[in-house]
Image (cartoon, rainbow, N blue to C red):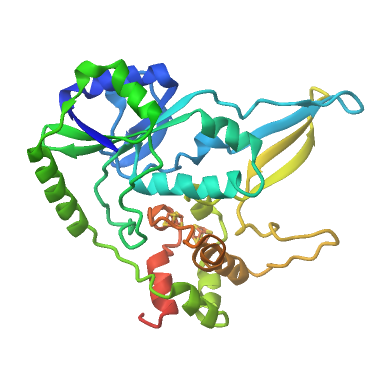
């Protein structure tokens, strides 16, 4: 991986240049300290120093709701390209976002390729940015606080400049298109980068103990902690919608007023009451406690067994946006008997 240096005053021109590679998405401050990932034309709105955005980048790859196919009842049905977004650039990806992208790739591109995801994924350019920990994130505990691959370019902020890591040929092409924005990095940059990494590591306040967690969960399947959690959880699905790795969806056939039948795909959540209902009406997880427990077991136990890593990157969004204050770190402290 090659590294270069870019002065901070070059950022606007760099962002303008990124537009040549697709629709540019960047974190924007919607209200004080509330950030959302939005398509931008005015590059001065981009806030690379943003805290975590509300809804993560997964919406760039799979829209919350899109038409898969459509046609008149009894007539010819055509595939729809409703979800196809064309070339897109995700600027400001945090390291945890990049790890989430790898998890989504495992889910959607390994055993059975999801064509809707794959078409957008192929055309996605990822430009990472070295974020600073907030009070809810615990990515350092999940080993996702830095990324060695999974991006095209990555900007690490240092005093008055960025250290720019180039990871792909596309990243290299972007740099070669605007060579005047970059210069060779120096030993001083490397020194400052190491000091930055040390300060950043010390800035994490929330930590989660993941040692032996899948095994402990195996032992704690009938622990009363899950019933207590079921009383507190509304099963509103908010945590799933904002989670960068939650990927459940449903497929629904609809007949619209224009006389066209459409098969649509919508984001779903295993927390919703009807998620596990099967033909005949039986619900495999009819109690809220079963559903919320399932979400935690899927992320920290089943996924580890199948893919060798949890499907939680410690971004903290589920903590921030839970209306009843459920905190994943505290849940596992309860499971361990520490609270
Ligand atoms: S956001 Fe909170 S209340 Fe809503 S489903 Fe998730 S854990 Fe339950
Ligand atoms: S479970 Fe929570 S902390 Fe983990 S990746 Fe999802 S939203 Fe982030």
Please, which residue is most extreme toward the right here?
74
Q: Position of residue 130 (x, y in %)?
A: 26, 42
Q: In the rendered image of this protein, does residue 26 appear above or below residue 190?
A: above
State the residue in front, 69 or 224: 69
Residue 79 percent location from the top left of the image: 74, 27
Relative image position of residue 49 (x, y in whole percent): 25, 38
Look at the picture and state if 297 lies above or below 73: below
**Looking at the image, which residue is at 52% across and 68% down?**
301
Residue at the spot 18% in from the left edge and 59% down from the top edge = 202
Judging depth in this view, the residue of 262 and 256 nearest the camera is 262
Left or right: 16, with 23 as reference point: left
Q: Is residue 212 visible?
A: yes
Foreground pick, 232 / 171:
171
**Quadrant holding the N terminus:** top left
Quadrant where ligand 2 appears: bottom left
In which quadrant will I find the C terminus? Answer: bottom left
Q: Tell me the quarter of the picture where residue 154 sits.
A: top left
The residue located at (57%, 60%) in the rendering is 235
């Amino acid at each position: 991986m090659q590294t270069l240096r870019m002065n901070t005053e070059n950022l606007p021109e760099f962002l303008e240049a990124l537009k040549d590679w697709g629709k540019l998405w960047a974190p924007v401050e919607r209200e004080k300290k509330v950030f959302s990932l939005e398509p931008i034309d005015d590059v001065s709105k981009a806030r690379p120093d943003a805290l975590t955005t509300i809804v993560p980048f997964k919406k760039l790859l799979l829209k919350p709701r899109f038409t898969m196919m459509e046609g008149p009842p009894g007539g010819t049905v055509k595939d729809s390209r409703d979800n196809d977004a064309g070339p897109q650039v995700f600027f400001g990806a945090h390291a945890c976002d990049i790890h989430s992208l790898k998890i989504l790739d495992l889910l959607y591109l390994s055993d059975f390729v999801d064509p809707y995801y794959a078409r957008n994924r192929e055309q996605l350019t990822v430009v990472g940015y070295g974020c600073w920990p907030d009070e809810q994130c615990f990515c350092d505990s999940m080993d996702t606080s830095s990324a060695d691959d999974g991006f095209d370019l990555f900007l690490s902020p240092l005093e008055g400049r960025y250290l720019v890591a180039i990871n792909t040929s596309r990243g290299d092409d972007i740099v070669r298109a605007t060579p005047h924005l970059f210069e060779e990095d120096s030993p001083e940059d490397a020194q400052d980068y190491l000091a930055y990494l040390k300060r950043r590591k010390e800035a994490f306040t929330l930590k989660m103990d993941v040692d032996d967690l899948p095994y402990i969960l195996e032992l704690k399947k009938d622990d009363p902690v899950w019933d207590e959690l079921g009383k507190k959880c509304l099963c509103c699905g908010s945590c799933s919608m904002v989670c960068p790795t939650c990927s459940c969806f449903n497929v629904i056939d609809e007949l619209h007023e224009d006389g066209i039948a459409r098969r649509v795909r919508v984001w779903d959540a295993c927390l919703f009451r009807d998620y596990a209902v099967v033909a005949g009406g039986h619900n495999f997880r009819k109690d809220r406690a079963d559903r919320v427990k399932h979400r935690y077991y899927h992320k920290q136990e089943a996924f580890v067994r199948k893919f060798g890593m949890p499907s939680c990157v410690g971004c903290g969004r589920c903590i921030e946006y839970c209306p009843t204050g459920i905190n994943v770190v505290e849940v596992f402290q309860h499971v361990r008997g520490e609270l």
